[in-house]
Amino acid sequence: MPTRDPSLSLYTTEQVRAIDRTAIDRCGVAGFELMQRAADAAFASLRRRWPDARRIGVLAGAGNNGGDAFLLARLAWQAGLDVDLLALTAASRGDAERARATFIEAGGRIRRAEAGAALPASDVLVDGLFGTGLGRPLDGVAADLVERIAGVPVLALDVPSGLDADTGARDGACVRADATVSFVAWKRGLFTADALDQCGARELATLDLPAAAYDGIAVDAELVDAQIGRVLPPRRANVNKSRFGHVLALGGDDGYGGAIRLTGEAALRCGAGLVSVATRAAHVGALNAARPELMARGVDDGAALAPLLQRATVLALGPGLGLRDWGRSLFEAALTSGKPLVVDADALNLLADVPRRVPPGAVLTPHPGEAARLLGCDVASVQRDRFAAARELARTRSAIVVLKGAGSLVAAPDGRVVVCPWGNPGMASAGMGDVLTGVIAALLAQGCDAWDAARLGVALHARAGDAAAGDAPRGLVAGDLFGPLRRLVNGACA
Ligand SMILES: NC(=O)C1=CN([C@@H]2O[C@H](COP(=O)(O)OP(=O)(O)OC[C@H]3O[C@@H](n4cnc5c(N)ncnc54)[C@H](O)[C@@H]3O)[C@@H](O)[C@H]2O)[C@@H](O)CC1
Ligand SMILES: Nc1ncnc2c1ncn2[C@@H]1O[C@H](COP(=O)(O)OP(=O)(O)O)[C@@H](O)[C@H]1O
Ligand SMILES: [K+]
């Protein structure tokens, strides 16, 4: 991938280690100097965030993450603060041992963390137990310490200890930080899954590495860039609705008319020129009454869809579609039409059942449950490595895949991945996915290719969710997103 903007570039831990090695071996920046810079950056962050803190508690592990912690402890000590440092081991390795010695030389004292050791009484606790070297779940004294942290703000060095920095998954005890200062480059796992509960505010400290340290290391993924104007330019004045596509939303079996209405309305609110809805006849009256701009049509089966499919430029297939014969027949007709489409909800469940190919340019929008069905695994396996799951689905289905949930990922068959840093737990409510389907369909209808429509759609949807939720996520409903979506799609997020 081309970008080198460090604030958007995401790497695996192996890649970050390679960057560190290049900086040390080829750019002449000593490892200890890097550690010192890491400690400087983290201490500056601590002072900025908690200027009144007098008592600094520090947890230090045996590796270089612990080395960062010793050097931060020395800075705090030299600044006249009280420092209570608990070390997991009696000795460290390499640069970290030198860092330990430096702290002791400066007059600092170290308590050895035995089973049941009292956590430091502190105003801020610094977590330097494990960073990118974490190789297995925390256990023993480390797990015990981490599980007993309570009632004190926590600053994590590089990664909250216990979090897998490659996947964002935790397996057992894990530090819940208020802020995480990450060093050198963003680790991709800080932006999805459990990471959203464990990291707190994220801050990147690149430690002034020379640009050459990053040479030859392609980013593994990127954060979504919200520069909407780049892919969806402002509208010209002399245009008419036929320029902006005709979305056909298909779904809404008995009892699920609301789902497809949300999809249709989202497509309208994001600028599709025309939106038709093919649904159960029983829903048409209510749809027309509630949203007359939607052209709602009752269809008995897939055969009845032919004229609608012919007129449509983009399909939004699946919300409320159901798994009965009616839904199956619409599913078959829609896929056979070869039109560009967004495949969601029950259409994904049908896709998991029926060995069908989706047309080129399709966007699949599974939540982890749907992704698991498509991959033939369980939800926990998807969540254990969302990057791998999204990439595998995109590759095997030759489609753009949006793996939804906290920290949504968008993956392409060629391995590209972007991660959405927005969204909130208020969006864990019925109908939110139906809205996303309409958003992406509208962007396809207005000329975005599948990749742009998916990444931009995910960004708009999540930012609209954040704008609508404000500081009150509980009780957010999907329809609340329409107002913010309209503002954002017109460029408010650029
Ligand atoms: N020179 C460098 O490479 C730099 C490294 N930095 C820091 O160094 C960290 C990485 O350091 P390390 O590679 O030493 O690794 P860590 O300090 O994260 O872990 C230390 C060691 O603990 C052991 N371990 C792993 N999981 C364990 C578990 N669950 N229970 C018990 N022991 C376990 C492993 O042997 C591992 O190597 C980064 O996260 C960052 O904080 C920074 O100082 C910046 C520069
Ligand atoms: N905890 C969360 N944080 C951020 N976004 C979330 C969260 N929970 C759900 N979302 C987003 O809300 C949408 C929910 O989609 P989905 O699960 O398909 O809901 P539904 O089937 O009810 O429409 C997705 O875009 C998802 O990424
Ligand atoms: K840590």
Image (cartoon, helix red, strand yellow):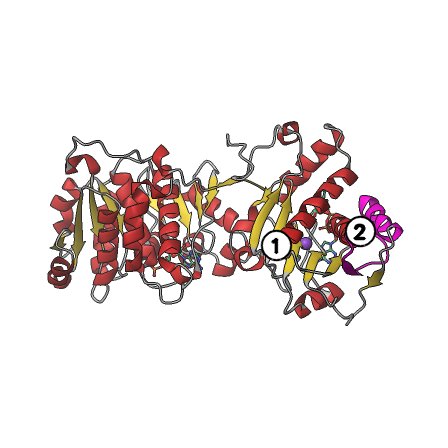
Q: Residue 102: say if magenta.
A: yes
Amino acid at pointer 2: Gln
Q: Which residues are magenta?
A: 78-105
Residue placed under numbered mark 1 in the picture? 49
Q: Residue at x 73, y 68 (%)?
A: 121
Residue placed under numbered mark 2 in the picture? 78
Element under label 2?
helix
Q: Residues within 10 Å of mark 1 (few under 14, many from 20)?
A: some
Q: Quadrant of the C terminus?
A: top left
Answer yes or no: disc 2 within 8 Å of ligand 1: no
For residue 96, side relative to residue 129 (left or right): right
Q: Which image quarter has ligand 2?
A: bottom left
Element under label 1?
helix
Amino acid at pointer 1: Arg
Q: Residue at x 72, y 41 (%)?
A: 37
Q: Residue 64: say if magenta.
A: no
For residue 51, side relative to residue 398 (left or right): right
Label 2 to label 1: alpha-carbon separation: 19 Å
